[in-house]
């Protein structure tokens, strides 16, 4: 297709050429002179037009770059981060990840984009919810998005696809969601302009805010990313929901069992002390709970915090112990097991993903409405809640490894060390009576049953032949292009 400016300039040149012809026929003797005069006019007109065309083209390029700048940036960031991830098995440093921290223009716009967003977010059942799920390409986010979609709710996902762990797994989750009609936008929660645009385009009834910097021990290596995601990012979501959404949605967000920190009363109850975090990760989640209080108090936002207890299962997080141990066992590499300072086994209240998904949906269903409005007026107090979502039965990590060994048919090469002082806690144990009372939360999956489902998925996803494992051969877990995209879990 010809460029508009180039087609108009060629039209003008044609007109000038016609002028030369007319002049030639109009005057006999002075024809040569007039032709010369005509030619110099043409040269002047052409260079003028050329100059205008160049200015216009430059302006068009500048506009194009301004519109696409964030996506171009994020693409190159993704590539370099992915390269960093593939060169190391441990999470890469992410110092440049939150470039949008102070807000930015967004690459998203246009009628087609809005149609896509609305289509994904529109419920398909009477009285269905319209939910913005942040961290939708993450482990819990993807499962919840699928479960919401399966029951007819509208879902729009948001994820920045950072390289904390393999972005390929996040992309695979995104494709799975797309196959069920759920759009996941690649954007950061700190992109305030985008959040405003989304709330302007869709009257979300709920936000399920799961985007965060996860991982307890990684906070020692990349502290700023925790502040950027778990504090600044949370504020960005609350700000948009409180001051730019009409009506205000109810918000359910991911806190963490780690907020109990040095608490020794067990099982952990929501009434226990949470003012002694043992890690920066825990501190940012605790800060989030305080920030939630402020937004609820000032703006009348309905806010529910969910304290997740070591969630595991198919499509899980490769940085977590059960997943990385499975990989190491398969690859014949050693694993490091932490032992508490008093010599006892470290224990976790491992919670299966399907149980957690039921808890998340229960929390959304009972959230209660926000009472504020864009104008800043609050009609009265709005719900402010916090719940434990655990399994209520802690299991030693050594037992978790024994189950994996049995399921994989291969022994782990174990190295036992005293737990380093890196923010870890020796045990977690949830009391879930509040969640049971308010939305019927009853976890039903044992660690044996849950890990069996995880290992089935794990072997299928990484195309590992269990028969080869049993013979003790070394098998890698590199992903291949043609991955299995089976059902994500029973809950969905
Ligand atoms: O419950 C929570 O709130 C948290 O649960 C997990 O944190 P964590 O329980 O530390 O999970 P893993 O990293 O999978 O560790 C599980 C257990 O394995 C142990 N472990 C971990 C790594 C390792 O190399 N060796 C080892 O023995 C840890 O001490 C811990 O007891 C998640 O990673 C956090 O994002 C989440 O917020």
Image: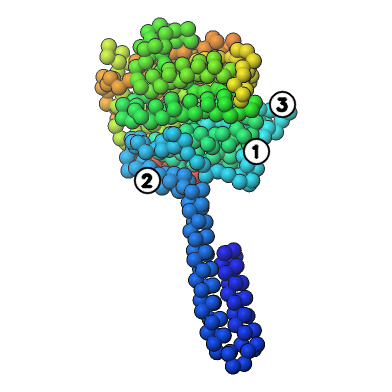
Q: At 49% across and 23% down in the image, what residue appears?
A: 254
Going from the N terminus, do you reach mark 1 or mark 3 first?
Answer: 1
Q: Is mark 3 within 8 Å of ligand 1?
A: no
Residue lying at the far right in this picture: please name it.
126
Tell me the residue that label 1 is attached to: 118
Mark number for residue 127? 3
Q: Position of residue 137 (x, y in %)?
A: 51, 36
**Quadrant location, the N terminus:** bottom right
Q: Are marks 1 and 2 in contact (CB under 8 Å)?
A: no
Mark nearest the camera among 1 and 2 is: 1
Which is more foreground, mark 1 or mark 3?
A: 1
CA separation in Å, label 1 and label 2: 32 Å
**Residue 132: where, in percent of width, then height?**
58, 31
Label 3 environment density (alpha carbons within 10 Å; few <14, some 14–19, many ≥20): few
Q: Which mark is residue 80?
A: 2
Q: CA distance from mark 1 to mark 3?
A: 16 Å
């Amino acid at each position: 297709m010809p460029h508009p400016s180039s087609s108009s300039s060629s039209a003008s040149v044609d007109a000038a050429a016609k002028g030369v012809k007319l002049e030639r026929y109009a005057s006999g003797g002075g024809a040569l002179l007039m032709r010369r005069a005509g030619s110099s006019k043409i040269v002047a007109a052409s260079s003028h037009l050329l100059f205008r065309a160049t200015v216009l083209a430059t302006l068009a390029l500048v506009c194009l770059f301004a519109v696409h700048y964030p996506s171009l940036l994020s693409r190159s960031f993704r590539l370099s981060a992915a390269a960093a991830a593939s060169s190391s098995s441990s999470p890469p440093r992410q110092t440049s990840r939150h470039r949008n921290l102070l807000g930015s223009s967004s690459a998203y716009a246009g009628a087609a984009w809005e149609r896509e967003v609305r289509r994904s977010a529109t419920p398909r059942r009477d009285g269905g919810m319209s939910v913005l799920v942040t961290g939708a390409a993450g482990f819990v986010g993807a499962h919840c998005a699928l479960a919401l979609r399966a029951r007819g709710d509208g879902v729009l996902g948001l994820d920045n696809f950072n390289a904390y762990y393999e972005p390929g797994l996040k992309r695979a989750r995104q494709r799975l969601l797309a196959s069920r009609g759920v759009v996941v936008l690649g954007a950061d929660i700190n992109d305030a302009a985008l959040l405003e645009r989304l709330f302007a385009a869709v009257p979300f009834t709920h936000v399920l805010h799961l985007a965060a910097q996860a991982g307890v021990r990684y906070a020692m290596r990349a502290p700023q990313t925790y502040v950027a995601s778990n504090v600044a990012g949370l504020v960005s979501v609350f700000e948009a929901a409180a001051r730019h959404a009409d009506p205000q949605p109810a918000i359910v967000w991911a806190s963490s069992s780690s907020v109990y920190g040095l608490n020794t009363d067990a099982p952990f109850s929501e009434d226990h002390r949470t003012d002694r975090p043992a890690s920066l990760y825990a501190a940012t989640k605790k800060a989030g709970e305080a920030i939630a209080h402020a937004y609820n108090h000032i703006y009348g936002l309905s806010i529910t915090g969910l304290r997740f207890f070591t969630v595991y299962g198919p499509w899980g997080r490769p940085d977590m112990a059960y997943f990385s141990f499975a990989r190491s066992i398969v690859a014949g590499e050693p694993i490091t097991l932490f032992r508490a300072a008093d010599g006892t086994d470290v224990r976790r209240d491992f919670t299966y993903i399907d149980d957690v998904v039921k808890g998340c949906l229960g929390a959304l269903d009972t959230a209660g409405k926000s009472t504020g409005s864009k104008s800043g007026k609050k009609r009265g107090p709005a719900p402010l809640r916090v719940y434990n979502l655990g399994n209520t039965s802690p299991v030693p990590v050594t037992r978790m490894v024994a189950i994996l060994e049995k399921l994989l048919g291969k022994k782990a090469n174990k190295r036992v060390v005293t737990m380093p002082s890196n923010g870890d806690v020796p045990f977690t144990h949830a009391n879930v009576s509040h969640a049971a009372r308010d939305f019927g939360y009853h976890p039903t999956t044992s660690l044996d049953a849950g890990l069996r489902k995880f290992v089935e998925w794990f072997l299928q996803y990484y195309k590992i032949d269990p028969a080869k494992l049993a013979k003790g051969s070394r098998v890698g877990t590199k992903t291949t292009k043609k991955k299995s995209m089976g059902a994500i879990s029973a809950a969905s």
